[in-house]
């Protein structure tokens, strides 16, 4: 049923898309010609994904995966796709595989590659096409196709009980076939790499590492083997992968994820400086790609994840201003009703988490309560985070009355948390509730009850810490909170135990080390206090001035030299010049020029509208009913848009008199522009190089002439309530910048 629904939606989209190949005069094609010209000629799996042809990429690592094709260019693009696939850059991998398929429409392994890259419901569609062609390739390639076919197969015979084959059974069949492939072709290191990928982590971690070492023995610069080794040891014995951490970012210097993943290992084992360099490198490489390819923050999950993770590491290094600034960047990113909204773990969600975590960790209570700090949305996750940090803020300001009211708002969310779609928040709610109740009890003088509640919260947090999303969303390690409470209650021996426990969860945590300096000194163990102080001086060697925890540790009066106790070799991180890697901040990009003409033959330029926002709409032509529906909606909103200092321009391949006819029939109050050769459409990425046809696009350009938001695809964008709100937000932002 779901699949049939998806197909029907795809067909409806395709119907409008199919019209784009019609003559610019606006004359309609018959139905048969329309379907032939549309995206459906390659199947519904091609209606989403990359639209622009690939380019030869550098800094991605090199692989050699021979396939059956008579076109050497196909082999080139396939190899590039595999290299990108090994770095989990699925979108760009798909672009390369799709272009290879365009050059060789019968390439079975190109379809196989697409099935790997399309990590959604399209994967099985592509794999079926590979299966259809498996008899036309080598025995080795056929084995690849059949292995993945087995893993995805759902129509295997039922067992004796009438049950369908389980995922476990299909996985075992897949592994058996992949093993046979490796045994039959022992020199095929790609098969070994994919075998190791499937086995990495968990109970087969050591076996997987042995296989990856075999790959590296043949090719020391294999990007996939190094990448998979890092994942293999992530969150468990991370020092095992330090050699791959050093190699992977060098081999795949042009891929943000190759810079990012070593940061996982470095942060997991407490090498915070190295982690900062890795994650900052990742953000810069990613932002450089976004700038060059005109990619928006909501088009790539990596952008938000990198920035959030960098902020977490900066917090560990005692850099609140840097962490807060990065989090605000995420919240300033354009929203999107599909890709950046409160329901998704995108820029808004991660920005909210990052900013709330940094402000609470560094006790910026007034900033938390400032109504202009956050862009809170009507979503359970936002409401839970808000109630939690505002309760902390009121407690920090010693306003117990408001703290109690804020906690009541937190408690009242229990019914929402119990809904199936919010179950992922249940553990957070429980731990937050215990912590807040404990802090409230301490504030009221109920010491024993408060300590017990915070201890319970700390235990639960520690138990699930490794299962949290990276980076941790928690502003405080609660064993640190407990340790501080013990210090206030003059029980330093218990504080020592709490801070030491915290350090087993987060290695080289500066906040725990600062607490240990005070706690060990209070119990009379100067040696241990000095050791903790030496470690703190190293971890916070780049800390911003004015941190109260550092001041309290210094006040103890100990003398020490910075000491690093991290495992493995370190880099001289201060010698790295990060500015060479690209921009540190994502910015909207300069809009290309229009060079389109109106119905009177006058060339229209975006410069003519400088000082106004421009809502630029690419539609297929006056023959496209979906397009006309969109234009009618824009006409209804025209005055509202004008009141927001926004001008509408609509572009198609139509020529006069088709433009005039559309304008007259609809009563269009804004310019309709002609782009007969789709040159302007290409510049604005409103053109499909694979299908060689124009696309729908709705683009918001700010009054500086910079593209703020865009949606391009197979159907017109019609969510104008969202656009109105985003324009309002854009105006507020640009007005604020102008005021500065």
Image (cartoon, grey):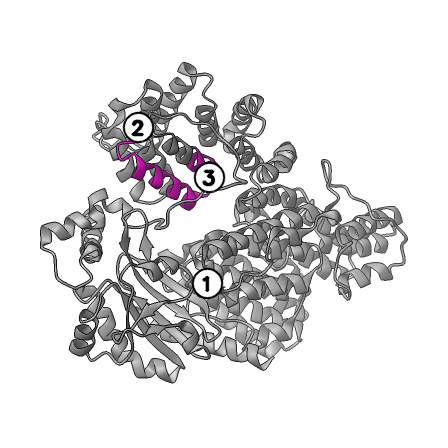
Front label number (3 vs 2)? 3
Q: Are marks 1 and 3 in contact (CB under 8 Å)?
A: no
Q: Residues within 10 Å of mark 2 (few under 14, many from 20)?
A: many
From the viewer's perspective, is residue 200 above or below residue 509?
above
Residue 84 locus on image (x, y percent): 46, 39
From the viewer's perspective, is residue 170 above or below residue 555?
above
Picture quadrant where residue 541 is located: bottom right
Picture quadrant where residue 443 is located: bottom right
- Residue 511 appears in view: yes
Residue 220 locus on image (x, y percent): 58, 26
Label 2 – label 1 distance at C-alpha = 39 Å
Label 1 – label 3 distance at C-alpha = 33 Å
Q: Which residue is mark 3?
A: 84
For residue 400: magenta? no
On residue 150, the disc is 2
Q: Are marks 3 and 2 in contact (CB under 8 Å)?
A: no
Q: Which residue is mark 1?
A: 381
For residue 93: magenta? yes
Determine the main secondary structure of the stretch shown in magenta: helix
Q: Residues within 10 Å of mark 1 (few under 14, many from 20)?
A: many
Residue stretch rendered in magenta on the structure? 79-108
The mark that comes first in sequence, 1 or 3, is: 3
From the viewer's perspective, is residue 418 above or below residue 44?
below
Q: Secondary structure at mark 3?
A: helix
Left or right of 585, for residue 155: left
């Amino acid at each position: 049923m779901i699949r049939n629904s998806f197909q029907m939606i795809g067909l409806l989209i395709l119907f409008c898309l199919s019209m784009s190949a019609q003559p610019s005069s606006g004359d309609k094609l018959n139905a048969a010609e329309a379907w032939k010209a549309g995206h459906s000629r390659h199947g519904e799996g091609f209606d989403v994904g990359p639209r622009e042809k690939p380019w030869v990429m550098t800094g991605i690592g090199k692989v050699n995966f021979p396939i059956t094709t008579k076109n050497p260019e196909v082999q080139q693009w396939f190899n590039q796709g595999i290299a990108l696939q090994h770095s989990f850059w699925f979108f760009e991998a798909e672009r390369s595989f799709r272009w290879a398929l365009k050059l060789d429409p019968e390439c079975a392994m190109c379809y196989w590659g697409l099935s790997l890259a399309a990590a959604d419901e399209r994967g099985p569609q592509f794999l079926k096409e590979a299966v259809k062609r498996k008899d036309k390739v080598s025995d080795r390639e056929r084995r690849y196709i059949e292995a993945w076919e087995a893993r995805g197969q759902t129509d295997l015979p039922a067992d004796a009980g009438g049950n369908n084959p389980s995922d476990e059974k299909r996985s075992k069949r897949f592994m058996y076939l992949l093993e046979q492939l490796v045994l039959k072709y022992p020199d095929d290191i790609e098969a070994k790499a994919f075998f190791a990928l499937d086995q990495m982590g968990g109970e087969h971690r050591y076996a997987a590492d042995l296989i990856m070492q075999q790959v590296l023995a043949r090719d020391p610069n294999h990007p996939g083997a190094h990448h998979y080794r890092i994942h293999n040891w992530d969150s468990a014995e991370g020092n095992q992968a330090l050699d791959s951490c050093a190699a992977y970012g060098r081999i795949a210097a042009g891929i943000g994820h190759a810079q990012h993943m070593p940061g996982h290992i470095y942060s997991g084992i407490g090498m915070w400086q190295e982690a900062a360099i890795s994650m900052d490198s990742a953000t810069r490489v990613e932002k450089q790609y976004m700038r060059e390819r005109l990619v928006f923050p909501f088009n790539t999950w990596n952008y938000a994840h990198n920035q959030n993770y960098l902020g977490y590491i900066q917090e560990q290094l005692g850099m609140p201003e840097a962490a807060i600034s990065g989090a605000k960047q995420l919240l300033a990113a354009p929203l999107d009703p599909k890709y950046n909204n409160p329901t998704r773990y995108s820029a808004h969600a991660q920005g909210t988490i990052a900013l709330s975590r940094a402000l609470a960790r560094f006790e910026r209570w007034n900033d938390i309560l400032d109504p202009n700090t956050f862009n809170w949305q009507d979503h359970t996750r936002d409401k839970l985070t808000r109630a939690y940090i505002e309760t902390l803020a009121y407690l920090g300001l010693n306003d117990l009355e408001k703290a109690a009211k804020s906690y009541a708002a937190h408690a009242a969310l229990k019914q929402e948390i119990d809904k199936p779609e919010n179950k992922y928040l249940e553990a957070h709610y429980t731990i937050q509730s215990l912590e807040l109740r404990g802090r409230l009890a301490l504030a009221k003088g109920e010491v024993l009850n408060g300590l017990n509640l915070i201890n319970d919260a700390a235990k639960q947090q520690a138990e699930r810490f490794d299962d949290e999303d990276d980076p941790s969303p928690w502003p405080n390690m609660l064993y640190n909170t407990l340790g501080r409470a013990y210090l206030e209650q003059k029980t330093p021996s218990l504080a020592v135990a709490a801070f030491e426990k915290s350090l087993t969860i987060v290695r080289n945590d500066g906040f725990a080390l600062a607490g240990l300096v005070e706690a060990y000194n209070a119990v009379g163990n100067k040696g241990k206090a000095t050791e903790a102080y030496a470690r703190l001086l190293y971890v916070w060697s780049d800390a911003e001035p004015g941190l109260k925890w550092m001041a309290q540790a210094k006040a103890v009066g100990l003398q020490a030299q910075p000491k690093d106790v991290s495992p493995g070799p370190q880099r001289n991180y201060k010698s790295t010049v990060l500015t060479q890697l690209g921009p540190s901040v994502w910015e909207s990009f300069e809009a290309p020029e229009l060079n389109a003409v109106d119905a009177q033959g006058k060339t229209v330029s975006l410069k003519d509208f400088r000082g106004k926002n421009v809502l630029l709409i690419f539609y297929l032509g006056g023959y496209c009913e979906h397009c006309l529906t969109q234009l009618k909606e824009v006409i209804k909103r025209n005055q509202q848009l004008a009141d927001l200092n926004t001008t509408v321009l609509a572009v198609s391949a139509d020529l006069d008199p088709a433009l005039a006819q559309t304008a007259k029939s609809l009563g269009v109050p804004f310019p309709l522009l002609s782009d007969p050769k789709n040159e302007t459409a290409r510049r604005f990425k409103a053109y499909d190089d694979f299908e060689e046809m124009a696309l729908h696009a709705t683009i918001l350009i700010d009054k500086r002439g910079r593209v703020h938001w865009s949606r391009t695809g197979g159907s017109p964008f019609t969510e104008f309530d969202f656009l109105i709100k985003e324009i309002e937000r854009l105006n507020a932002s640009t007005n604020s910048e102008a005021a500065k």
